[in-house]
Image (tube, rainbow, N blue to C red):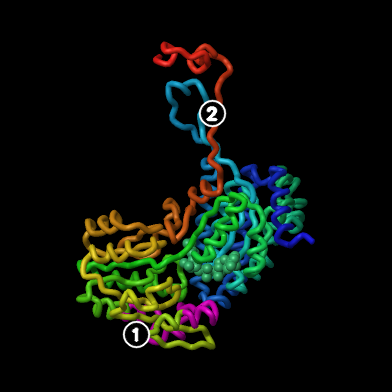
C-alpha cells in the first residue's frame, strides 16, 4: 500500500507539474490566503501556543505572527521584482545577446518545523516556497502538539481545494484570474503531521528541496536522507551562541537586553544567548543587573507572570535541570515539574568542563564564564563549533569589529540580542554546525529558487564565430 507520506508528495508533485503554482497571480493569492489564516485564526493560533508553551496573548503576535505578516507584506510588494529576469553585465562577446538570470521554482519543497516558535519556523519557509512558485509539503513539529493539530485542522481551510472551490465559484465572475488557481491548493500544500517514524518515511521520498529547522543531530539525518536523491537542503540548526560583555559597557542596558533575549520563550530560542563571557571583575555586577531586569520583566515570582513561558515537555524539563549539576546557582533554580516551570536561572563561575557547557541549553539557564580579555573570549569561541548567533556588548566599536572579524557565526548582533533575525534584508541562517543556507525576505525567494543562467544569442553574425570552429591555426588563436 502507498504510504500517506508518499501520497502527499505525489499529489504535490502532480500539481506542480501542471504548472499551476508558477503564475505570480497564483503565488499572490496563496500568500494572501496565508495572511487571512493568520488574521482570522489569531485566537485559535494563540490558544494552541498558550497550551504548548504558555505563550501569552501578547507574545504570540509579537514573536510568532508579526514577523510572518511583515514577511508576507514584503513578499507581496517585491515578488514581481524578485521573480523577474535579472540582466547581468555584458562583455564584448555577449554585447548583442540577451544575458540574464531567470529565477525558477525548484519543484516540491519539504518544510520540517521545530516546536519552539512552531508557527514562525514552519510558516516562514512556506512563504518563501510559495513566493518562489513551488509546491510544498509541511511537517510541523509533533512536539508542539497543539499548534501542530491546529495547523493540520486550519491550514487546509485556507490552502485546501474544497474550501477554496467554494470561494472560487463565488469569485469567478468577479475576477477571472481566480479560475486557474485555488482549486489545486490542497495538493500543493498538504500538511503532514507526525513523529519520527512518519518523518523518516517522509524523508525517503524525493523532494526538490528540504528546509529543516531543528537540532544538529537530526539535521545530519535529514541531509543523509536528502543525499540519496541529491536533494539540496537548508538546515536551520542551533548551537551555543556566546555573549561577550566588555568591561567598557553600559552594564545596565546590556543586561536588560540580554535578560530579554535569554528568557523570552523560557530560553527556548535558537538564537538566545547561551552563555556569557566576561571579565571576572564585572561578574557580580552582571548578576545584579540581570536580577534587576528579571524583576522588572516578571515581578517577584516569574511563575505567576503572564509573560514567562514554560518548558515544552517533561523530557526537556528534566534535561535542562540536569544541566545544573555541579554549578553555582546565583539566581533562580526553583522549578515545578507539574507545570514544566523552571525559574530564570543564572550560574556563576562556570567552568568550560561543566555539563551545562557541553550542549545547547535551550532553556532558562544562563551560565557566566570568565574571559580575562577579548582575545581570550575570541579564542574560547573559536575552539568550539560555529554558533548560530554571536553577541558582543561594548562601548568600543573597534572591539566589536575585532570580535566580528576574528570569529564566525551564522549572524551577529552587537549591543543587543536576537534583532538580526528581524531584519529581513539580512540572510538568516547558520554556518558549520549551526546549519547551511539562509532565508528571510529575498533570501528565502532565492534559496527556494533555481537561479538559472540564460543566454540567448542571435542566429545571425555567424562570421564572428569563425575563430572557435576548426580547423584551428596560430593566427586564429591570437586574435
Ligand atoms: P523537534 O524535536 O521538534 O525536531 C525538529 C523536527 O525534526 C520535528 O519536525 C521532528 O519531527 C523531526 N525529527 C525529530 N527526530 C527525527 C528523526 N530521528 N528523523 C527525522 N526527523 C526527526 O525540535 P528540536 O530539534 O528539539 O528543536 C530545537 C533545536 O532547533 C535547537 O537546537 C534550536 O536551536 C534549533 N532551532 C533552530 C532554529 C533556526 O532557525 N536555526 C529555529 C528554531 C530551533
Q: Which circle marks residue 455 in the picture? A: 2
- With 173 as the anchor, is 116 left or right in this view? left
Spatial CA distance of label 2 from label 1 is 64 Å
The stretch drawn in magenta includes residue 318: yes
x 59%, y 74%: residue: 47
Pointer 1: what residue? 329
Measured as percent of width and height from the top left, residue 108 is found at: 64, 51
Asked whether residue 232 is in view, the answer is yes
- Which stretch did the figure color magenta? 291-319
Task: Assess disc 2: are there few (<14), some (14-19) or many (≥20) residues with their C-alpha within 10 Å of its C-alpha.
Answer: few
Q: On screen, 20 above or below 393?
A: above
Q: Quadrant of ligand 1?
A: bottom right
- Determine the secondary structure under disc 2: strand
Q: Nearer the viewer, residue 397 or 50?
A: 397
The reply to whether residue 62 is in sight is no
Q: Is residue 249 above or below residue 464?
A: below
Find out whether residue 179 is within the magenta segment: no
Q: Position of residue 449 (x, y in %)?
A: 56, 45
Amino acid at each position: 500500500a502507498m504510504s500517506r507520506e508518499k501520497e502527499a508528495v505525489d499529489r504535490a508533485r502532480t500539481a506542480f507539474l501542471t504548472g499551476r503554482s508558477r503564475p505570480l497571480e497564483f503565488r499572490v493569492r496563496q500568500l494572501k490566503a496565508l495572511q487571512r489564516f493568520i488574521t482570522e485564526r489569531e485566537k485559535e493560533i494563540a490558544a494552541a501556543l498558550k497550551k504548548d508553551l504558555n505563550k501569552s496573548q501578547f507574545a504570540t503576535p509579537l514573536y510568532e505572527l508579526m514577523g510572518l505578516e511583515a514577511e508576507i507584506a514584503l513578499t507581496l510588494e517585491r515578488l514581481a521584482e524578485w521573480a523577474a529576469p535579472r540582466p547581468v553585465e555584458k562583455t564584448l562577446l555577449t554585447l548583442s545577446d540577451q544575458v540574464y538570470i531567470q529565477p525558477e521554482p525548484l519543484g516540491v519543497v519539504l518544510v520540517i518545523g521545530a516546536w519552539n516558535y512552531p508557527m514562525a519556523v514552519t510558516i516562514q519557509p512556506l512563504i518563501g516556497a510559495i513566493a518562489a512558485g513551488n509546491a510544498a509539503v509541511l511537517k510541523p513539529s509533533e512536539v508542539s502538539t497543539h499548534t501542530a493539530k491546529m495547523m493540520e485542522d486550519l491550514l487546509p481551510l485556507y490552502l485546501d481545494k474544497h474550501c477554496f472551490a467554494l470561494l472560487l465559484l463565488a469569485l469567478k465572475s468577479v475576477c477571472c484570474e481566480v479560475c486557474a488557481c485555488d482549486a489545486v491548493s490542497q495538493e500543493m500544500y498538504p500538511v503532514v503531521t507526525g513523529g519520527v517514524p512518519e518523518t523518516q518515511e517522509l524523508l525517503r521520498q524525493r523532494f526538490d528541496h528540504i528546509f529543516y529547522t531543528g537540532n544538529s543531530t537530526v539535521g545530519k539525518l535529514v541531509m543523509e536522507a536528502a543525499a540519496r536523491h541529491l536533494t539540496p537542503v537548508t538546515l536551520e540548526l542551533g548551537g551555543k551562541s556566546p555573549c561577550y560583555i566588555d568591561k567598557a559597557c553600559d552594564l545596565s542596558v546590556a543586561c536588560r537586553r540580554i535578560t530579554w533575549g535569554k528568557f523570552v520563550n523560557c530560553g527556548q530560542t535558537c538564537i538566545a544567548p547561551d552563555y556569557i563571557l566576561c571579565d571576572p571583575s564585572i561578574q557580580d555586577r552582571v548578576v545584579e543587573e540581570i536580577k534587576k531586569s528579571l524583576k522588572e520583566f516578571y515581578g517577584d515570582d516569574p511563575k505567576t507572570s503572564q509573560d514567562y513561558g514554560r518548558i515544552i515537555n517533561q523530557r526537556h524539563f528534566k534535561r535542562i535541570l540536569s544541566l545544573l549539576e555541579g554549578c553555582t546557582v546565583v539566581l533562580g533554580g526553583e522549578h515545578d515539574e507539574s507545570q514544566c516551570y523552571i525559574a530564570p536561572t543564572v550560574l556563576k563561575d562556570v567552568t568550560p568542563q561543566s555539563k551545562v557547557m557541553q550542549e545547547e541549553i535551550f532553556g532558562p539557564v544562563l551560565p557566566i564564564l570568565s574571559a580575562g580579555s577579548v582575545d581570550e573570549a575570541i579564542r574560547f569561541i573559536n575552539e568550539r563549533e560555529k554558533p548560530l548567533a554571536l553577541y558582543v556588548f561594548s562601548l568600543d566599536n573597534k572591539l566589536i569589529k575585532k570580535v566580528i572579524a576574528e570569529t564566525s557565526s551564522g549572524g551577529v548582533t552587537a549591543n543587543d540580542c536576537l534583532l538580526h533575525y528581524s531584519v529581513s534584508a539580512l540572510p538568516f541562517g547558520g554556518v558549520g554546525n549551526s546549519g547551511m543556507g539562509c532565508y528571510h525576505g529575498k533570501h528565502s525567494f532565492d534559496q527556494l529558487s533555481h537561479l538559472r543562467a540564460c543566454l540567448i544569442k542571435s542566429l545571425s553574425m555567424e562570421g564572428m564565430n569563425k575563430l572557435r570552429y576548426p580547423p584551428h591555426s596560430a593566427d586564429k588563436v591570437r586574435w
